[in-house]
Image: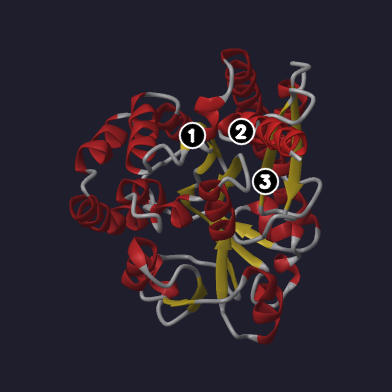
Amino acid sequence: MKKSISFMIIVLVAVVTALSGCSGNDADASEGDGKLKIIAAHNQTSPDNPYQIGMKEFKKVAEQNENVEVEVHAGTLGTSESELVEKLKLGAADVVLVSPGFMSKTGIKEIDLFALPYVFDSYDHWEKAVDGEVGDEMADIINEQSNNDFKLLGYWTAGVRHYYGKKPLESIGDLDGMKYRTQTSGAVADYWEETGAVPTSVAWGELYQALQQGVVDAAENAYPYFVQQNHHKTDNGKFITETAHDYTTRFLLVNGKKFDSYSEEQQQAVLDAAEAAVKKERETLYEQEEEFKQTAIDDGAKVNEIDREPFMELAKPIQDKTAEENGFTDLLEKVRELK
């Protein structure tokens, strides 16, 4: 009997020891074969979307290290960015792509810098900001204020956003009274209210029907996004005015705590993959903007340019107010100095 009890104790100790060896960050980071498995996710479902192309590049470069494996989820972990942010925080995803709007809901107020209308006036200006001192400062802010839940790997873009609606804009006054699908709170909503438009909430998946049925008079987005959804073929979406009010920013994030658990070799593989993915995603987006603009024109949409100066002047007081309220006046000034 004593021998049986002794044997059981030995077995239990062995089991506990084995389990304890598989606990903690090392278990999260690696599979049984010692490979680092990374779950990477974004919210777009189209295989041709720049997000997916960028993530595929991330996977390709990361897996050049034989000890790293990347599993890409295109909308399959959730089409809501708030879901992805939560999954990243909880460790159910390792790398995600999200917008400033959803990141600001985490309480990191400085992120609203990238949501301000007309804070950037060209892609060159945007790249100088995100790839320079401003981008480095924002990366530090995100990491520190999230207590290392979020570590920024790079800045992606979702294009430059323009107006499209039931009539072309010839002046800022043409927006007066227009039901405009855009954000309904924060600096973005404040801005469009100042133009006289009525910010209206419509889910992205329901916007085609809302434009077709006159629920909204107009909307705003970048060419690759609204043209792929055929919004330009609706009665209330066929007139495109290039307002260029938002050179968009997207954050490629990794769970910082998990990243710290990786070996130096694995960390370098992730950083190299992120650098390659940033380059690929931007190149793809820039090419698609021209491609889908031409598609819209070929399909019968009407495109016109407009004097943006009145739009930009209207934005400045809102930029100043938002920056003061959220503590990023210095960052805003640094962005302005880069123009």
Tag 3 or tag 1, which sits nearer the N-term?
3
Q: Is residue 36 left or right of residue 152?
A: right
Q: CA distance from mark 1 to mark 3?
A: 18 Å
Q: Residue visible at 36% across and 57% down?
A: 311
Residue 170 numbered mark, or none: none
Mark 1 is surrounded, within 10 Å at the Cα level, by few (under 14), some (14 to 19) or many (20 or more) other residues, namely some
Q: Say if residue 47 shows up in the picture.
A: yes
> Residue flagged by tag 1: what amino acid is it?
Lys
In the figure, 317 relative to 63: above or below?
Answer: below
Q: Nearer the viewer, mark 3 or mark 2?
A: 2
Is residue 53 at least partly visible in the picture?
Answer: no
Label 1 close to label 3 by CB (< 8 Å) = no
Amino acid type at image mark 2:
Ser
Q: Can you say which quadrant of the picture contains the N terminus?
A: top right
- The alpha-carbon separation of the residues under discs 3 and 2 comes to 30 Å
Disc 2 crowd, CA 10 A, few/some/many (<14, 14-19, 20+): few
Of residues 123 and 323, which is closer to you in this image? 323
Residue 63 point in image, percent of width and height: 76, 22
Residue 48, picture quadrant: top right
**Mark 2 — residue?**
20
Q: Which residue is mark 1?
A: 257
From the viewer's perspective, tell me whether residue 245 is left or right of residue 47: left
Residue 279: quarter of image: top right
User: What residue is drawn where x is 33% and y is 30%?
Assistant: 137
Q: Nearer the viewer, residue 37 or 168?
A: 37
Q: Which residue is mark 3?
A: 41
Q: Gap between marks 2 and 1, in whole Å? A: 19 Å
Q: Residue at 57% across / 57% down in the picture?
A: 81
The mark closer to the camera, 1 or 3, is 1
Q: Quadrant of the C terminus?
A: top left
